[in-house]
Image (cartoon, rainbow, N blue to C red):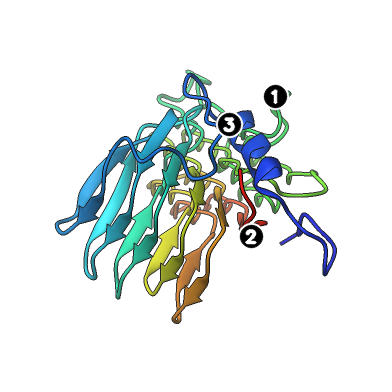
Amino acid sequence: MTFLKADGEVFSHTEANTALRARAVGKTKTTFGGDGSDGSRTVATSDTIALTQAGYDYTNLTINTGQTLSGTGAKPEVLIIRCSGNLVISGTGKLSVVGNGATNGTGETGATSNDATTGAEGSWDASGVAMGGSGSNSGSGGGGGSWASGISGGGANPGSGGLKNTLVIMDRPFYGAGGGGGAFGASDGADGGKGGGAILIQVAGNVTIEGSIDVSGEAASASDEYGGGGGGAGSFVIFYKGTLTESTPTYTIAGGAGGVGNTSTGGAGGAGNYLIQKVWDGAD
């Protein structure tokens, strides 16, 4: 990953709030970690959380071992969580936004339809160069771009892989681009995978991670002919003021696998990125 500061420099809560405001909509906060207005949340049974740029203001968020808190929703929404207290992901607990990024491309239907589509672009590139290309006239879909380029699909006329993010630093999360759809052969082409989602977390207290955080791109569908491209992975950023305790955590930032086709396989999505950054713990 690329860090925001050189070794020994201080990253302040004000800068972290600037990154938050670049992503948050409709609920601007001036206090790092939010106001705790959504109370304390413990995920004792696997549950969902809607991606919303207004975000959530917990006092504490705990994901118990064996349980998963999964995002719902997709681009352009980002999962924003603020904790005025602590964040704990215990044991095998998981926070996941797999497939919550940019929309996937769809496979071609029918020999003359020519309707295979590209995946939607990732959040860093409004021009769309980060999307995964669709296969056309006998080709599989290309993988969606992320912090690494997507892989081109297989076949005679494959979809190109999405380009990588060219930003110099990472101070906010980005979702991955969708993979392209596969072409028609003797049967319909396969759909691509959705891009991975984006998570932005502020913790005024301590962070403890024993479990996992997953921002992977979605795997593409298989086909009897031409597979789709995998979705590009997303990314996550955690800013905290207190202490960080990591006990063999798992951070999954993999692009989705290309869909297997009997004729050719789609390209894999590009890998994502993450940043866990302590900020200055002075007064707000």
Tell which of 88 and 253 is nearer to you. Answer: 88
Name the residue tied to disc 1. 126
Answer whether residue 161 is visible to the viewer in this image.
no
Identify the residue at horizontal 65%, vertical 38% (top origin).
19
Q: Position of residue 81 (x, y in %)?
A: 43, 43
93 to 216, vertically: above or below: below
Specify which label sits upstream in the sequence, 2 or 3: 3
Q: Position of residue 78 (x, y in %)?
A: 48, 35
Specify which label sits upstream in the sequence, 3 or 1: 3
Identify the residue at horizontal 25%, vertical 43% (top origin).
48
Task: Spot the residue most to the bottom.
Answer: 248
Q: Position of residue 121 (x, y in %)?
A: 62, 31
In the visual, does 183 lie left or right of 94? right
Indicate which disc residue 23 carries: 3
How far apart in space, not on screen, are marks 2 and 1 (Cα)? 27 Å
SS class of the residue under badge 3? helix
Q: Residues within 10 Å of mark 1 (few under 14, many from 20)?
A: few
Task: Spot the residue most to the front.
Answer: 283
Indicate which disc residue 277 carries: 2
Kind of residue sitting beneath label 3: Arg
